[in-house]
Amino acid sequence: MRNIAKAVQYVCCGLLLFAAANCYALCQDIKIIALLLGVYIGINIAPIFVLPRTKRLRACARGNALLIEFLISTACSVVYFLQSLFSSPDWKAILVNTLFAILLEAIVFWNGIIRVYIRSQQLGIKIRVIGIVCGLIPVAQLIALGLIIRTVSKEIAFENRRVLLDEQRKDLRICATKYPVLMVHGVFFRDFRYLNYWGRIPEALQKNGARIFYGNHQSAAAVAQSGQEISDRILQIVKETGCEKVNIIAHSKGGLDCRSALTNPEIAKHVATLTTINTPHRGCEFADYLLDKIPKDEQEVVAGAYNAALRRLGDTSPDFMAAVTNLTASFCKAFNERVFDAQGVYYQSIGTKLNKASGGRFPLNFTYHLAHYFDGANDGLVGEASFAWGEDYRLLTVNGKRGISHGDMIDLNRENIEEFDVREFYVQLVADLKKRGF
């Protein structure tokens, strides 16, 4: 019913914009012309009445509505122009009206497109570039505009449902676990304040009552060194908050780092749970292959450049080669033989897979083929057989060609995936820890 009301509003506003844009030819009464132009200004300011809950989404909704109404108005203007060519001998009047209509239609279009380009998160660089490139190409511009409208419409509906859901359960605080959550990043990333490794996930957890901390360890180091840094961080959190224990959620290599930290009984007693996300517990066969095939000199050049760059970003002693070597299947086999799970800690694991290489963004759509050759079904980096660890294990994917990638599980691209809401997944994951008494 709401969709029908919205469609009726789009049509009505589109027709009013058409009447205003063509008022020079449609009406000779100055009062009616002034009224139509006033309505035109009003629609440009408020093109839709039923609005989402947040400021950003409201801006997107207004911009998207203007683009839809622009299409309706422009279609009517084109039909009216063609009809005028065959029915009116006054070419001067047709020309003046056409120029006036083009000006007013253009204002509606730019008012809408600027709003969605500035405020939409799901358009991304790709669709924005498509819109710009196709903007001056007949027919292609309509296809691009349709893509923009469809993408923004889905974003508004998806995000508004999330807002309403969080509002409805706000008082339940379903993520208010007994112990705070420590989120541990994977290799080649750091915990930056304004570029969160976990995307929109921490905010979703905090809205539902979670207390969040970060590992703050270096981006690339040997598992043992990263494990020591995480151990120090756990002790710091316990000391500063008095929380006694933490629930760890670790992504990728971070899971190995945390398992290493938990070999110390003095650290393990301060950890209630360890949830590993897409962690290569059995390593990556293709990592062994690459290290064997790439000349040592080339490896050292890449490692040197990386280490130098990350020192500037805050790492004290980055070690690119140690990190990469500790992701091999050979290292993980030896690691698993000597590192055992800590007693009293609940271990669980999550893995995902891409259904096709094209389901992942670069470079995962490239590395997928390499991982698939050596490790079979994978998430773009880690093989499915490597994920499982602990008492409980779940493998996630979605129907169709896409699947869920290594990066999707940390909301790397801030992308809304049909059939899989990554933020809600983590909310329910932490809510389950609360139900278990952690």
Image (cartoon, rainbow, N blue to C red):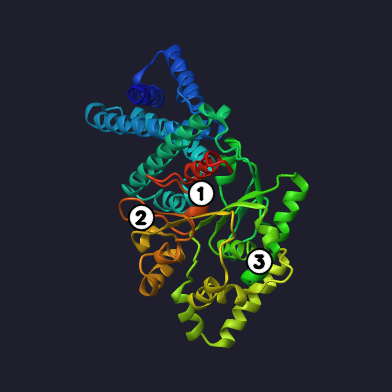
Q: Quadrant of the N terminus?
A: top left
Reply above or below: 309 against 265.
Answer: below
Residue 347: percent from left, percent from top: 53, 55
Which of the two marks, 2 or 3, is nearer to us in this view?
Answer: 3
Residue at the outermost front position? 343
Residue 139: percent from left, percent from top: 31, 47
Residue 260 has which mark? none
Residue ID for mark 2? 402
Q: How far apart, in angstroms, are the residues tagged by discs 1 and 3?
A: 27 Å
- Residue type at mark 2: give it: Arg
- Density class for disc 2 (Cα within 10 Å; few <14, some 14-19, many ≥20) is some
Reply above or below: 102 against 250.
Answer: above
Residue 414 has which mark? 1
- Residue type at mark 1: give it: Arg
Identify the residue at image location x=50%, y=62%.
Answer: 279
Residue ID for mark 3? 226
Residue 17 is left or right of residue 337, and the answer is left
- Density class for disc 1 (Cα within 10 Å; few <14, some 14-19, many ≥20) is some
Reply above or below: 224 against 421.
Answer: below
Which of the two marks, 1 or 3, is nearer to us in this view?
Answer: 3
Q: Secondary structure at mark 2?
A: loop
